[in-house]
Image: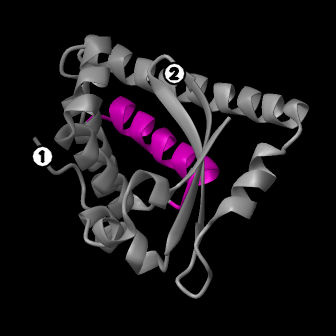
């Protein structure tokens, strides 16, 4: 188990100038982050991120010591749970890839249902993922070359397909119908 704070990754004065901090963390009143890397498999990494608001002190040495002292059997149980989540994420990608290979349109019911299942999975296990947040995540999937490479290694064009399905599902969920997104 690897435990780090945001200040282990970035100098605080640099971090507070990043788009990530100002557009994502600051509006949620997140001041300090503790990142616990729980597992890594098939190019995917599972982390537990704990945050503190501005009115609280930064995470520090005592916090790290408490986490490192978690009994091994509990860490193993957490890692097993994370393995299950990673398997679900990979199954989601396989579902999208199968739909793409079968010629299902990204704006069709099959792909949108996969996108909705993906959105609900995120909301259940990670954070409240409304349709706007899901669109933002879709944009990340096609703006970051690492995501594109991971998705397109499974099936060429998968990153754009998933993005378009996520947008179409968000439009459907917000009563906007099937608006062309690509």
Say whether residue 113 is magenta.
yes
Compared with 84, 122 (above or below) is: below
Which residue is identified by label 1?
A: 180
With respect to residue 137, does 147 lie above or below? above
Left or right relative to 8: residue 36: right
Q: Residue at x 40, y 79 (%)?
A: 27
Quadrant including the N terminus? top right
**Image depth: mark 2 or mark 1 in front:** 2
In which quarter of the view is residue 47 placed?
A: top right
Mark 2 residue element: helix
Q: CA distance from mark 2 to mark 1?
A: 26 Å
| Residue lying farthest to the front in this orientation | 61
User: Is 173 on the left or on the right of 3, as rendered?
Assistant: left
| Quarter of the figure with residue 171 | bottom left
Which quarter of the image is occupied by the C terminus?
Answer: top left
- Seen from the viewer's position, the closer of residues 2 and 179 is 2
Asked whether the beta carbons under mark 2 and mark 1 sit within 8 Å of each other, the answer is no
Circle 1 sits in a helix, a strand or a loop, which is it? loop
Q: Is residue 85 above or below residue 34?
A: above
Q: Which residues are magenta?
A: 108-128
Labelled disc at residue 69: none
Which picture quadrant has residue 103?
A: top left
- Categorize mark 1 by other alpha carbons within 10 Å: few (<14), some (14-19), many (20+): few
Q: Give the x, y percent position of residue 57.
A: 61, 79
- Which of the two residues, 139 or 56, is positioned nearer the viewer here? 56
Instruction: Tell me if mark 2 has few (under 14), some (14-19) or many (20+) residues whose alpha carbon lies within 10 angstroms of its own.
Output: few
What residue sits 26% from the left and 30% below the top?
A: 146
Report the residue marked by disc 2. 91
């Amino acid at each position: 188990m690897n435990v780090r704070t945001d200040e282990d990754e970035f100098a605080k004065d640099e971090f507070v100038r990043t788009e990530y901090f100002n557009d994502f963390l600051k509006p949620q009143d997140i001041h300090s982050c503790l990142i616990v890397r729980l597992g890594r498999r098939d190019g995917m990494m599972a982390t537990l991120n704990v945050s503190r608001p501005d009115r609280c002190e930064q995470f520090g040495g005592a916090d790290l010591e408490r986490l490192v002292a978690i009994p091994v059997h509990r860490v193993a149980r957490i890692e097993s749970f994370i393995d299950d989540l990673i398997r679900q994420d990979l199954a989601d990608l396989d579902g999208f890839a199968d739909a793409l290979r079968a010629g299902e349109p990204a704006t069709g019911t099959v792909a949108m249902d996969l996108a909705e299942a993906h959105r609900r999975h995120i909301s259940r296990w990670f954070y409240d993922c409304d349709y706007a947040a899901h669109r933002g995540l879709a944009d990340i999937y096609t703006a970051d070359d690492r995501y594109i490479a991971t998705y397109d290694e499974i099936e060429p064009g998968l990153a754009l397909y998933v993005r378009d399905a996520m947008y179409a599902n968000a439009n459907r969920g917000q009563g906007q119908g099937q608006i062309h997104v690509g």
